[in-house]
Image (spheres, rainbow, N blue to C red):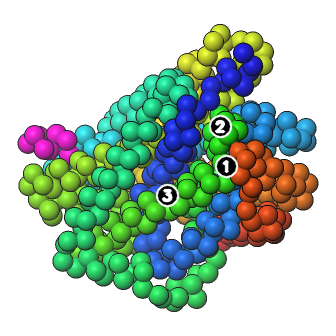
Amino acid sequence: MSDHHRRGTFGSNMGFLMAAVGSAVGLGNIWGFPYKMGNNGGFVFLLVYLILAVFVGMCVMMGEMAIGRKTRQGPAGAYRALSQKFGWLGWLAVIAGFVILCFYLVLGGMVLRYAVGYFLAMFGVDTFGDPASFFGAFLTNGWSMVAFFALFAIINAAIVMGGVEGGIERFNKFAMPALFFLLLIVLIYVACQPGAGEGYRYIFGVNFEPLKTDFLGVVKTAAGQMFFSLSLGMAIMLTYGSYLPESENIQKNTVIIVAFDTLIAIMAGMVVLPACAAFGLDYGGGPGLLFATMQMVFHNMGGFIGNLMGFLFYFLVFLAAISSSISIMEGTVATRVDRNFRENKGGKSGGRRRASLIITIAALVLGLPVALDGLGSGIAGGALVNAPAQILNIAVHGWNDCWLDLYDMISEGILMPLGSLIMALCIGWSWGTDMILDECAKCGVKPWGRRFFEVCYKVITPIGMLIVLYGQIVSFFG
Ligand code: PHE
C-alpha cells in the first residue's frame, strides 16, 4: 500500500463535506459571530463579512484544499513538497492550530458545563442557582473550569484517535445535520417571542453609520472572524483535502462549505441578537453573550420548556465545538503521523494514538491559564491566575486583558492571516493560479472563474490580509 492509502481517505464525498463543514461550523459561528456582530454595528459587520468570505475566504479555502490533495501530505510536508523554501509555512499553520486548540478546548468545556447543567435541570436538579450571577461565579471557579476543560479534551482525543474514517467522518455525518435542525428549532422559538423584530432590524436594516466611526475596526474584526470561522490559515482544509479522492470536485465543495458556514453563522446571529432584543438585553454583551445572555433567555422562558430549550441549544453548540476541535487536532496529529509513515515508525496507524495523547496533554497544560484567569477577572476578581496585563503590569489592550485574548491574537490575529497571505502570494505570483485550477479539474469538470481567482490570489486576498495584520499591529501598540 502506498503512504497515501495508509494515511486513510474519506469514505465518501458526503463524509468529506460533513467533516469540512464540521470543522468550519463551530464556536466561531455560534459564539463568536453573534457577539462580534453585536459589537460592530450589526448590518455593516454582516456586509463586510460576506464580501470577505467571497473574495478572500473562498480563494484561500480552495487553494488549501487543492494543495493538500495535490501533495497528499499534512501541512509541513505539503508546503515542502511545493517549494523547499516554504516548508515553514506548514509549521506556522501547525503552531497556529495548536495555540487555538489550547483555548478552544477551554471554551468547549464551558459549553459542556452548560449542556450538562440544563440536562440535569430537566430532571429537577438545579446546578446553576441564580442565572444572573452564575456565569461570573463559574468563570472564577477554577476547579469546575478545569474539570470541564479536561473532560472536553478527553472526548476530543478519543474521537481523533479513531482516525479519519472511523472517528472523524462517522461523527460528523450524524452531528452536522443534527446541529442544523436543532438551530432551526431554537430560531423559530425565538422568532415567536414578542420584541424579537428589533434584533432582525439590527442585522438586516441598512445602516452604514458604524463604518464611519471605525472602519478599520469593523474590517479587522470581520476578517479575523472569517478566517477563524472557515478554519483557514491553519492547514485544516489542506489536511482534509489530502484525504480527498481525485474524483471529487474541489470547487463545488468549497462553495458549499463557505455557504453553509455563513448560513449557520447568520442563523446563530438570528437566534442570539433577536433573543437579546426580546428579553431586553444588550447586544454588546461581548464574549459572554452566548453564556450569560442566552442563559437569561432560557431562564425567562422558564419551567421545563426553558430547561429543554437550554439543553438543546448548548448541546448543539457542543456538537459544533467538538467537530471543530477534532479538526484542529487532526491538523497537528497528521503532521506527526505523516512523519512516522515516512520513517516507518508507529505501526499500522502511524502512531496516531500516541500523537493524539501527547498533543492533548500539551494543550491541557498550556490551556490552564486560559481556564484559570476567569476571562481576565484575575486574582483580585476571585480567579486563580492573573491575566497577562496584570502579570506584566501594563496597560490593558484587547490582546492582553485575558489569556484567551492573547492566544487569540497570536493565532487568529497574526499566524493565520500571515500564513494565508504568503500562501496567496505564492499561488498568485509563483506557483500559479493554474496549479490550483488544474488540481480542481482532475474531477473531470472544468473549473470556473479563472480570471476571478487570479485577481484574488494576486491582489485582493493579499490586501485583505494586510488590512488584518495592520489592524492587529495598531491595536497592539495603540
Ligand atoms: N472554524 C471553527 C469555528 O468556527 C474553528 C476552527 C478554527 C477550526 C481553525 C479549525 C481551524 O469554530
Label 3: few (<14), some or many (≥20) within 10 Å?
A: some
Q: What element carries label 1?
A: helix
Tell me the amino acid under the disc marked 3.
Phe
Dot 2 or dot 1, earlier in sequence: 2
Give x and y (percent) for residue 307.
16, 51
The residue under the point 61% across, 81% down is 215
Q: In this view, does 379 lie to the left or right of 52?
A: left
Label 2 crowd (10 A; few <14 / some 14-19 / many >=20): many
- Residue 121 magenta-highlighted: yes
Which stretch appears magenta? 118-125
What numbered label is drawn on residue 244? 2
Q: Do the residues labelled 2 and 1 touch (CB within 8 Å)?
A: yes
Q: Which of marks 3 and 2 is nearer the N terminus?
A: 2
- Of 395 and 53, which appears nearest the observer? 53
On screen, 346 above or below 250? Answer: above
Give the prevailing secondary structure in the magenta stretch: helix
Callout 2, which amino acid?
Leu
Is residue 97 something that shows in the picture? yes
Q: Which residue occupies the foreground of this view, 34 or 291?
A: 34
Compute the Cα span from label 2 to label 1: 9 Å
Residue on which disc 3 sits: 260
Q: Which quadrant of the view contains residue 83? A: top right
Report which residue position mark 1 lands on. 250
Q: Do the residues labelled 3 and 2 touch (CB within 8 Å)?
A: no
The reply, left or right, for residue 348 in relation to residue 108 is right
Residue that appears at 22% across and 79% down: 195
CA–CA distance in space, label 3 to label 2: 19 Å
User: Against 395, is 199 above or below?
Assistant: below
